[in-house]
Image (cartoon, grey):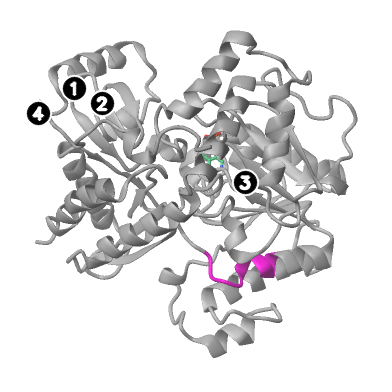
Amino acid sequence: MTAGPPIEDVHFADAPQMNTSIPGPKSKKLLERQREVDTSAVSYPRSVPIALDEGRGATLRDVDGNVFLDFFAGIGVLNVGHSNPHVLDAVNAQTEKLVHTIDFPTEARIEFIERLNDIAPSGLKDHNKVVFGGPSGSDAIEGSIKLAKHNTGRNAMMAFEGSYHGGTAGALTLTGGRKYKEGYDPLLPDVRHVPYPYPLRERGNADTENARAVCPAPNCCGDLSCGRALERVQAAVEDPYAGQEKPAAIWVEPIQGEGGVVVPPAGFLQGLRDIADDNDVMLIFDEIQSGFGRTGEWWAAEWHGVAPDAMTMAKGIGGAGLPLGAMMYHEDYDTWGPGGHIGTFRGNIPAMRGGIAAIDYIESHGLLDHAVELGEYIRGRLREADNDHLAEVRGQGCFIGAEFVDGEGKPSKEAKGMVKDIQTYCYERGVLVWTAGRQGTVLRLLPSLVMTHEQAERGLDIIVEAIEAQVD
Ligand SMILES: Cc1ncc(COP(=O)(O)O)c(C=O)c1O
C-alpha cells in the first residue's frame, strides 16, 4: 500500500505566487515585532525578510498569502516536505497518546531503532546500536565525542578545515568555521583541523601523477587535493613528532554543507577509513546535513561504499521537522554503562513516529531515485546559466552548490555579494534559496525530496535568471 498521497498533491498549487510586494504589510509588522522582542541573534530573516504562516511540501505561504517555492527546506530538515500528511497523521496519533518517555521502551522507539537499522549503511547494518541524547545535531556530536573518548581512552580529536558540526562546546571545537567559535576559547583541548579536499581550489588538481606521488592510499583516485589531504591526515595521526597524541577519532562530513557543499573526490573516505583502521582511530561520519535521503542514498557516504564506526544524524530524521538527534555506532563500541549517555529529551516519540513515517513515505514513493534525478536536472540547469563568475556547480542528489568567484577567480567579497544578490533576486520573485561556503560564495539549494520536476523547472527559470542578471 502506498504511504500517503503522491508528491504532486502535497504542495500549495501554482507556486510561486506573489500577491503583494515583499515583505508584505503583515510580514513587515511581524518582522518589526520580532525586532522588538526577539534576540539580536536572530539571523535568517535578515537575509530573507518574511513572516511565515503555513508550509506544504516544497511550498511555503507567508502571512500575506504569498506562496514561495522552497529550495531551502528549513535548512535541509524537511526532506519529505512541510507538513507531509502521512507524517503528520503518524505524529498526531502519537501526540494524542503519549509524548514524553525518556528512554522507557515504547512501540515507537523500538520500531524507529529497527527502521534505522533497515536503512543503515552496510558495515553498521545488523551490527549497530542507536543512542538518543538531546534533540539537536549538536547534541548528537557531543555524544559522538564522548563515545570516542570513552572507547579509546584518548582525548585528542581530528576534524577538517571547512567543517561545521554544531553550536555546543564540543561541536564548536570540531567546527572549522572561525566565525562560530571566536570569543569562546578555550573550548575542548587537543583538536587538530586538517585540510578537506577542495578540488576547485587546488592549483594543478588534474595532475594525477603528482597526486599518486603524495597520496598514501594504495588505490589513489588521482585527485591531487585528495592525495594532499590524506597525506596530511596520515602525518598528523602517525608522525611521532606530530605534536599531539593520536586522536580518539576523525570526524568528517561526507559532503561539507556549511563549508560550501564540497563533495570529496572518490578516494577520500576510503583513504580515511584505511588510515583510521591502521592506527586504531575511530572514524565518525557527520551525516546530519547529508543524510536521511538528501543525496539519493540514505546516507551520503554510501556513494563511496565506506562505513564509519559511528554516524551522527539529526535534521530530517524527525520527519516533520520535530527535533531529534541520534547516533548510530558499531556494536563493538557499546561499552557505556547505564546512564553513560543521557538527556531528558531522549525519548521524543512523536518525532520518532515522524521519522518512521518519513522512511515509509520516501520508500513508498521512490524518493531516493527521485532525489538523484531532480538533483541532476537542477545541476544541469545551473550549469547552463550564462555567467563567467559561476566557477562550479556540484553536489549529490538534492544537496546542491554553485560556487561563484570574482574576475580574478577568487572567492572575494565581490563574489559573496553576487550570491547575496542572487538570493535577494530569487526571494523577491518567490523562490527561497540559501548560501554557504567558507567565504559565503556558494549558492546552496536543499530542496525537499517531494519537489516535483515541474516545480524545479519553474524555480530554476527564476534562479538562472537571477544568476544571469548579475552579469555586468
Ligand atoms: C553537518 C552538520 N553537523 C551538525 C550540525 C548541527 O546541528 P544542529 O543545528 O541541529 O545542532 C549541522 C547543522 O547545520 C550540520 O550541518
- The residue pinned by badge 1 equals 65
State left or right for residue 169 relative to residue 462.
Answer: right
Q: Is residue 445 visible?
A: yes
Q: Quadrant of residue 7?
A: top left
**Does residue 12 show up magenta in the picture?**
no
- Mark nearer the N terminus (2 vs 4): 4
For label 4, the crowd category at 10 Å Cα-Cα, with few meaning under 14, some 14 to 19 and many 20 or more, is: few
Q: Which of labels 3 and 1 is toward the front?
A: 1
3D distance between C-alphas at marks 3 and 1? 42 Å
Instruction: First in sequence, mark 3 or 1: give its number.
Output: 1
Tag 4: residue type?
Answer: Ser
* Image location of residue 401, percent across then percent down: 37, 56
The residue carrying mark 4 is: 21
The boundaries of the magenta stretch are: 264-272
**Residue at left offset 86%, top offset 41%:** 334
Say which of marks 1 and 4 sits in front. 1
Does the residue at mark 2 contact the one at mark 4 (Cβ under 8 Å)?
Answer: no
Q: Helix, strand or loop at disc 1?
A: loop
Tell me the CA gap for discs 4 and 3: 42 Å
In the image, the residue with mark 1 has its CB under 8 Å from the nearest atom of ligand 1: no
What is the C-alpha distance between the residues marked 2 and 4?
A: 14 Å
Nearer to us of marks 2 and 4 is 2
Residue 126, x across and y down, in percent = 79, 48
Query: Amino acid type of disc 1?
Result: Gly
Judge depth for marks 4 and 3 and give the one in front.
4
Q: Amino acid at mark 2?
A: Arg
> Between disc 1 and disc 4, whose residue precedes?
4
